[in-house]
Image: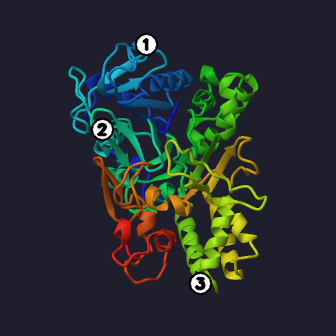
């Protein structure tokens, strides 16, 4: 369950950056060293100091049961639990609140000591982390890399998110900023694959931020959902990933050997089984089936995120060079909003949690622009170029019946494009509807309620401040919605 909640050249493989085991309890370190390096280490960051606590445990039980102690896969967990949401003892062997580290087995949980990399996490003491602080994630990744090296490393983050921020912590009363994560965690803790059990996170700005093009923490492949909705069917996913000879692979023609499964393959598999899970819910009927229609997911190859960034920026520039730029703006807004018998473009916004109308399907918008007679030849050509780049970025995707015309492998990735009447609040106002303050969608720093937002690489790269020339998508929105001599609400004068 993810109510309003819960990258592209990888410089070096993660296994080239790790140190020998040094900080896990001695018995754990010796047993890890005694066996051969696994194909995958999966690091699960459970930022559950909120009402996701009980749901996180259900998700984790599905995953560990499906992994079924396959020696080719290590399953390492950091969890920050909340007060008052769950008294469950079966998952970890006891009820507790606060932060701990575990090595998960099919039917048991082995508590770990964080040692040098994560000294706050001790087997014999409790501590209350701020899981919205990306320093916690950095320490967890350093711990995992150092003590559980593998051929490939994956990260699964489970919590709440909004597309603006993630991992709200009830104790600290703050969220983690998306650029803040990349900047704080750093490139040295990069991983091969990230899966986000977080709402509204399949955004092109997020993909670019967590790619090597943006100079920080990066991943090669990102799996995420653009909408608000429940978790993907991770039991189905991991039931298929087993080494030859493992009992769980017996009789399964579709079993995939973890040793041959790369990050792109994991991303494709997650989408494939995620869609099967949604279809199974639909077939079962009931209340949940009624909500399945507006659910989707995508896996992205972030090696192509820079190409998409450049293509969208070129599209933005072309719009400003139209013979009548104001007419071009009105044409693009009409393509987004619909009218005259035409439906609005595919959109993943949920007004409870995201800026109203802002999460527009990127490929669908570009396809409309490429076919729009009200736009000039150069703009339509730029839209076609951006469509081609987006098609390369999206490895696999699915969208249920509520997204009419959804094209698997093309749709499922959103672009921030708010309507004019929501722009100052949703883009150049606070991080959520009803809040006020500076901009979160900005190259500039922005803090709201202790959360460090702003500083998006998508908005920064290619932009030149105060030259009065639109150079990227962000500056196009700034020119349209916040064109003031003093920099306006967001402090940036394009």
In the rendered image, residue 303, in percent from the top left (x then y), is placed at: 54, 60
Which residue occupies 22% across, 37% down?
A: 116
Say which residue appears at 61% left-offset and 30% top-offset.
233
The disc at residue 226 is none
User: For numbered disc 3, what is the local secondary structure?
Assistant: loop
**Going from the N terminus, do you reach mark 2 or mark 1 first?**
1
The image shows residue 200, relative to residue 444, as above or below, that is above
Q: Is residue 338 above or below residue 465?
A: above
Question: Residue 167 at what x, y percent from top left?
Answer: 39, 39
Q: CA distance from mark 2 to mark 1?
A: 28 Å
Residue beneath the point at 40% across and 75% down: 484
Question: Considering only order in the chain, which callout, 1 or 3, is on the residue closer to the N terminus?
Answer: 1
Relative to 75, is 269 above or below?
below
Foreground label between 3 and 1: 3
- On the picture, is 467 further left or further right than 68? left
Q: Which callout, 3 or 2, points at the residue further toward the start of the chain?
A: 2
| Relative horizontal placement of residue 287, taking residue 96 as reference (left or right) | right
The residue singled out by tag 3 in the image is 321
Label 2 element class: loop
Q: Name the spot of residue 169 as percent of width and height, x first.
A: 33, 36
Neighbourhood count class around disc 1 (C-alpha, 10 Å): few under 14, some 14–19, many 20 upward: few
Q: Residues within 10 Å of mark 2 (few under 14, many from 20)?
A: few
Secondary element type, mark 1:
loop
The residue beneath circle 2 is: 173
The one nearer the camera, 167 or 208, is 167
Q: Is residue 391 visible?
A: no
- Res 351 quadrant in image: top right
Please give the residue where the numbered disc 1 appears in the rendered image: 90
């Amino acid at each position: 369950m993810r109510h309003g909640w819960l990258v592209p050249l990888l410089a070096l493989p993660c296994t080239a950056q790790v140190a020998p085991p040094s900080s896990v309890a001695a018995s754990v370190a010796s047993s890890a060293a005694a066996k051969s390096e696994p194909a995958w280490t999966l690091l699960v960051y459970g930022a559950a100091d909120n009402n996701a606590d009980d749901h996180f445990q259900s998700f984790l039980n599905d995953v560990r049961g499906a992994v079924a102690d396959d020696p080719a896969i290590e399953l390492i967990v950091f969890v920050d639990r909340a007060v008052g949401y769950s008294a469950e003892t079966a998952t970890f062997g006891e009820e507790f609140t606060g932060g701990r580290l575990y090595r998960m087995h099919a039917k048991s949980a082995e508590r770990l000591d964080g040692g040098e990399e994560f000294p706050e996490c001790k087997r014999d003491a409790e501590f209350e982390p701020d899981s919205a602080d990306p320093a916690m994630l950095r320490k967890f990744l350093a711990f995992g890399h150092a003590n559980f090296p593998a051929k490939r490393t994956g990260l699964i983050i489970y919590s709440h998110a909004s597309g603006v921020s993630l991992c709200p912590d009830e104790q600290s009363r703050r969220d983690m900023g998306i650029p803040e994560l990349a900047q704080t965690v750093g490139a040295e803790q990069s991983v091969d694959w990230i899966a986000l059990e977080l709402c509204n996170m399949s955004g092109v700005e997020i993909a670019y931020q967590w790619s090597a093009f943006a100079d920080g923490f990066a991943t090669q492949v990102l799996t995420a959902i653009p909408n608000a909705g429940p978790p993907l069917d991770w039991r189905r996913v991991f039931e298929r990933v087993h080494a030859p000879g493992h009992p769980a692979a017996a009789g399964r023609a579709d079993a995939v050997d973890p040793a041959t499964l790369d990050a792109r393959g994991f991303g494709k598999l997650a989408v494939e089984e995620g869609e099967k899970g949604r279809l199974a819910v639909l077939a079962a009927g009931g209340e949940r089936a009624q909500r399945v229609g507006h659910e989707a997911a995508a896996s992205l190859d972030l090696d192509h995120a820079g190409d998409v960034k450049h293509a969208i920026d070129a599209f933005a520039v072309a719009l400003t060079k139209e013979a009548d730029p104001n007419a071009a703006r009105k044409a693009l807004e009409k393509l987004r909003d619909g009218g005259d018998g035409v439906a609005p473009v595919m959109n993943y916004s949920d007004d409870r949690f995201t800026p109203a109308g802002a999460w527009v399907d990127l490929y669908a918008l570009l396809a409309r622009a490429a076919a729009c007679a009200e736009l000039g030849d150069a703009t339509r050509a730029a839209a076609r170029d951006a469509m081609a780049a987006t098609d390369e970025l999206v490895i696999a995707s699915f969208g249920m019946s509520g997204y009419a015309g959804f094209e698997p492998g093309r749709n499922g990735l959103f672009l921030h494009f708010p309507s004019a009447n929501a722009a100052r609040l949703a883009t150049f106002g606070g991080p959520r509807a009803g809040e006020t303050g500076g901009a979160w969608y900005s190259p500039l720093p922005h803090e709201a309620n202790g959360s460090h937002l702003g500083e998006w690489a998508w908005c920064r790269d290619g932009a030149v401040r105060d030259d009065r020339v639109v150079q990227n998508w962000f500056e196009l929105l700034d020119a349209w919605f916040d064109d003031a001599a003093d920099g306006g609400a967001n402090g940036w004068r394009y």
